[in-house]
Image (cartoon, helix red, strand yellow):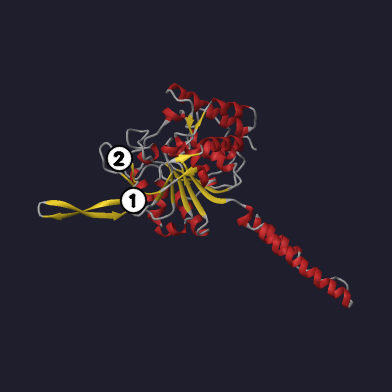
Amino acid sequence: MADRESAKEARSFSHPRSTRSHTSVGSLSAAACNSGFLFLLLFLSVILISPAAASGKKIIFDTDPGTDDAMALMLALHSPELDVRAITVVPGNTTAKQGLENALRMVSLANRCEIPVAAGAQHPLFQKLITAEFWHGKNGLANIELPPSKCKVDARFGPDLIIELVRGAPHEITLVPVGPLTNIALAIQKDPSIVPLVKEVVLMGGSIKGGNVNAAAEANIYNDPEAAQIVFQAGWPLTMVGLDVGDKTLLGRKHLEQLARTHGPVNDFIYSVAKFLVELSEKFGSDGTPMYDPLAVGVAVDANLVTAPLMHVDVETRGEFTRGETVANRRGEVERNVLRGDRYIIEGLDKVRPNAKVCIDVQADRFLQLFVSRIQGK
């Protein structure tokens, strides 16, 4: 849209000459001044309405549409800092089929049918899918039945769409995956050359303090550890928004009260989703629901919301008790062991190159107010 507006502005300023047949020296001088002035206006108009200035950060939102994914998606669609270029669906919280239906209905609810919504992988790379209706409701959306979608599914395969958009806008696309990383891994495997063309990856997943599926693993990583290891080792700028900070962003009763003061299709839907999650969390002794996926979108909006030191992160894919664990090297070095006879001897330390910014702290109140205000349309 901005390109067309720029062209229109350019055409409107492209003929500054007088339409009179005979022009005096004085009028020529005035025309020259006007021409220079109009050229300056043209230059400024192109800058002010250029795509980079008119739109926000270009993102591809990769999701397994459950409840917190719904809140994350609506935050992304209502944040002027972000320009959602595509939504790709991965199985996780729900099956791939249910997730695609959920995504289409939510995009329709938000009146954003211009955004491509594409189906992706149907299952993890090497293991069976584990769905989470226990936490998200039978349909993944807190059992809320949204109206049938007016939007149509994009015919392209999700990973192919990722590749196409990244290659079409090199160094401009931020990937925001908030589910298992299967689609992102498949895109890398099919076309590794996209890695240096991606601006950054801001993902929800992992933890350096223990898991929520079991003692070690966070749910998104646990649902496809092999895919996660591919994504973490790809070599692109990556920010891990994990349990460490998500557990500090609890949306509770006071936030529900704020959401209840305003109304609209999106506001009312998110209020119902949040109410479902808050009530579920209270059954398990928590004062609120962790805003895991929405916080990843929040970090894409404003990286200053979190403290995120660089670390090297690997994903455990073989451990009996630790499969799916994100193992972070906090010291940035490992001991170098050399075999001498019948034993190894420590000979020194080797540096480890960081591959991720790992979020360890968050301005929770500021983020929660950002979320509430955006859903309210403020």
Which amino acid lies under the numbered mark 1 shown in the image of this protein? Gly
Q: Determine which residue is flagged by label 1.
A: 332
Q: Determine which residue is flagged by label 2.
A: 323
Name the residue located 53 percent from the left edge and 36 percent from the top edge.
71
The answer to which of marks 2 and 1 sits earlier in the sequence is 2
Instruction: Describe residue 291's horizontal placement relative to residue 77 as left or right.
Output: left
Seen as rendered, the residue at the extreme front is 348
Could you classify mark 1 by the number of other residues whose Cα lies within 10 Å: few (under 14), some (14-19), or many (20 or more)? some
Q: Nearer the viewer, residue 341 or 371?
A: 341
Where does the N terminus fall, quadrant-wise? bottom right
User: Where residue 333 appears, x then y in whole percent?
Assistant: 30, 51
Name the residue located 52 percent from the left edge and 59 percent from the top edge.
168
Which amino acid lies under the numbered mark 2 shown in the image of this protein? Arg
Name the residue located 65 percent from the left edge and 30 percent from the top edge.
263
Instruction: Describe residue 16's horizontal placement relative to residue 253 as left or right.
Output: right
User: Where residue 109 appears, x then y in whole percent?
Assistant: 60, 37
